[in-house]
Amino acid sequence: MVNNDSPAILNFVTSLLNFPDTAVIEILHSSDGREITLVVKSTHETLPCRICNKPTHGHGLGRTLRFRHLSLLGKETYIEITPRRGICTDCDDHPTTTERMGWYERSSKMTKPYEQHLLFELVNSTVADVSRKEGTDYHAVEALCDLYEGYMNACKEVFDNKVPVVADRFHVRKLYRKSLVTLRKSELTRLKKQLTTDEYAELKPAIALLKKHKDYFTEEEKSIVEKLFSLSPKLKSAYQFSRELSGIFDSHITPTEAKEKITHWISAVTRSSLKCFNHFIQTLIKYQTQITNYFIHCNNSGFVEGFNNKVKVLKRRCYGLASATRLFQRLIVDTVGVIRFAPGVAAF
Ligand SMILES: [Zn+2]
């Protein structure tokens, strides 16, 4: 790599790049002359806590992220950033926050402008054509799927071990939350029998909160659920375990570190007297590789699931559709209609 780091050049490239609060600190040029990497940093003075929004104290750096960006002088261009991390001393548990910039999605391998560019290129073209033209590596494509065995095997067959198969984290979450729901129901049935009607009625706000399937509680919510948790220590520890597991999926770690942490989690659950996660643990062990592959790029199929849902709602609203053309017309109107036909009007 050859680098150019004269301040005048860096300032010039920063202004060309034009990303808010971002400065180019190094320009790397690969020796074969095909790639340019712009190493950038954030120019924000403080990093606000993701929970209370107060400034955090420096807590090292996160994993270096690399994004494909629009080509510069016909060369493949990448942007690299090592996000800062901060720790909050105001919140309980001292949560850490990793800085995020507006020009990328954490789950993506491209900057937002590059994503826009690819979408534009896809008009009247196929994914294969675009990936050939843009030189995007096919093997970088990941197969995101749920934990249905047939689907998992189909993916392995098609991608022939060359592409890591990733179990979608939200499908994993659905499974351990299901274990929680089963336990909650059985514990509530037990409490209903033991408590008087009035005593049980007092637990209603706590039950309503648990039904919201939240991973984390605010201070106020904690005090509401505490009452129920004191009556059912089993439920309390199950919720703690579930929160710990969500915490693992929320952290920026490598697949190996994730494997280690998950193994730790499994042994802690097994040591406790909880039985509700037994079935889930079997799945976790069986698909450990696919589940921890999530940590390679932290991708999830949230977009696909959301889109699926939109299509289902649309179908229901129309009471059936007679022609495919109509279906696609409706899809365009419902998904990008506001942007395409009424620019400037806020979507609702
Ligand atoms: Zn805080």
Image (cartoon, rainbow, N blue to C red):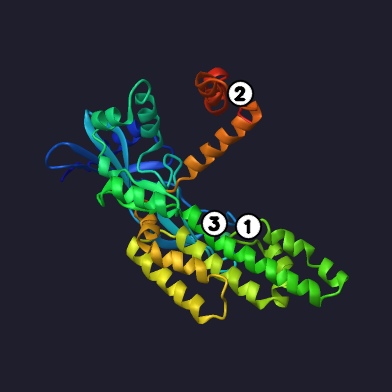
- How far apart in space, not on screen, are marks 2 and 3 (Cα)? 36 Å
Judged from the image, the secondary structure of the residue bearing numbered disc 1 is: loop
Amino acid beneath label 3: Lys
Amino acid beneath label 2: Val
Q: Residue at x 36, y 20 (%)?
A: 124
- Residue 293 at x, y percent in the picture: 35, 56
Q: For the residue with label 1, is its CB less than 8 Å from the closest atom of ligand 1? A: no
Q: Quadrant of ligand 1?
A: bottom right
Classify 10 Å Cα crowding around label 1: few (below 14), some (14-19), many (20 and above): few
Q: Residue at x 69, y 70 (%)?
A: 186
Instruction: Give me the disc on residue 97.
Output: none
Looking at the image, residue 71 sits to the left or right of residue 30; the answer is: right
Judged from the image, the secondary structure of the residue bearing numbered disc 3 is: helix
Q: Of residues 226 and 182, which is closer to you in this image? A: 182
Q: Earlier in the sequence, mark 2 or mark 1?
A: 1
Callouts 2 and 3 close, C-beta under 8 Å: no
- Residue 229 at x, y percent in the picture: 69, 73
Callouts 1 and 3 close, C-beta under 8 Å: no
Q: Residue furthest left?
A: 32
Q: Is residue 94 visible?
A: no
Amino acid beneath label 1: His
Tell me the residue that label 3 is attached to: 174
The quadrant where residue 296 appears = bottom left
Q: Earlier in the sequence, mark 2 or mark 3?
A: 3
201, above or below 153, in the image? below
- Residue 149 at x, y percent in the picture: 41, 55
Tally the marks. 3
Instruction: Give me the disc on residue 213.
Output: 1
